[in-house]
Image (tube, rainbow, N blue to C red):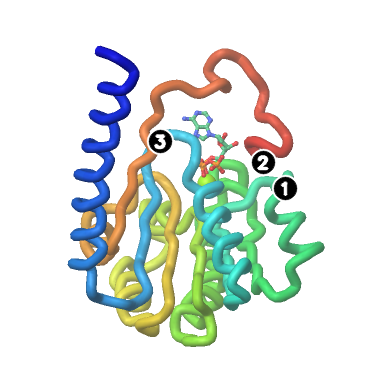
Amino acid sequence: MTQSDKNSRHQKAMAKQKASVDASIEAASTERGVAILLTGNGKGKSSSAFGMVMRALGYGYKVGVVQFIKGEQLSGEEIYLRDHCPQVDFYQMGTGFTWDTQDRSSDIAAARTTWERASAMLADPAYHLVVLDELTYMLAFDYLPEADVIDALAGRPPEQSVVVTGRGGGSALQDIMDTVSEVKDIKHAFNSGIKARRGVDY
Ligand code: ATP
Ligand code: MG
């Protein structure tokens, strides 16, 4: 095949793809906030959520972030939001990982207090985007009543988007989300003995 044949073939394929993309864009007619679940065992859930925080901030929207599990080490995005983004309402459960604290009743109390902050954001139309990082573990450990969480997510203001991250999450949660993406663990550097990297993993 000559170069010109290749170019002409590519041009036809792209025109076809454009027609199909344009038709899908035309067909999408509903304008409202979306509920997104980022789940799965691979790396990329929280960092994707913080990518959406940047997108929302780029347009000057109000953002709320609630983290349900926090290690001792602050992550780069946490430091950045704290020091440079006073417009982001940021709240951390702050008890550390549940397998570190090993104290179920104090974890439950902390989860409930943290949930009060999250549910207040989910009821406030001023927030364009709310990130509930690692929320799924609170459901998996039964620290929060699933029905309350689902009601608050489903009943949020129509213009508000919400991003939930964490492994698992259960089918009731998946059912009420508009977008569910599973990050698959094909390989991770940690399993080859490479240490978690500052600025990349935290
Ligand atoms: P990230 O914050 O990097 O987007 P994540 O939110 O998808 O990761 P978490 O389960 O919250 O994943 O874990 C966060 C930390 O654990 C990160 O340092 C990440 O690199 C690491 N991690 C994520 N997935 C794996 C994995 N499959 N094996 C080992 N470490 C992992
Ligand atoms: Mg995460």
Q: Residue at x 65, y 46 (%)?
A: 71
**Residue 66 on image: x %, y %:** 57, 65
Q: In the image shown, does 58 or 96 lie closer to the viewer?
A: 58
Residue at the (72%, 48%) spot, across then down:
76
Quarter placement of the C terminus = top right
Q: Residue 41 carries which label?
A: 3
- Closest to the observer: 15 or 164? 15
| 124 in relation to 29, above or below | below
Nearer to me, 89 or 1: 1
Q: Position of residue 9 (x, y in %)?
A: 23, 29
**Percent x, y for residue 52?**
52, 59
- Residues tagged 1 and 3 counted as in contact (Cβ below 8 A): no
Residue type indicated by callout 2: Tyr
**Residue that badge 2 annotates:** 202
Q: In this view, does 29 lie above or below 158?
A: above
Q: Is label 3's Cβ within 8 Å of ligand 1? A: yes
Q: Name the residue under label 1.
A: 76
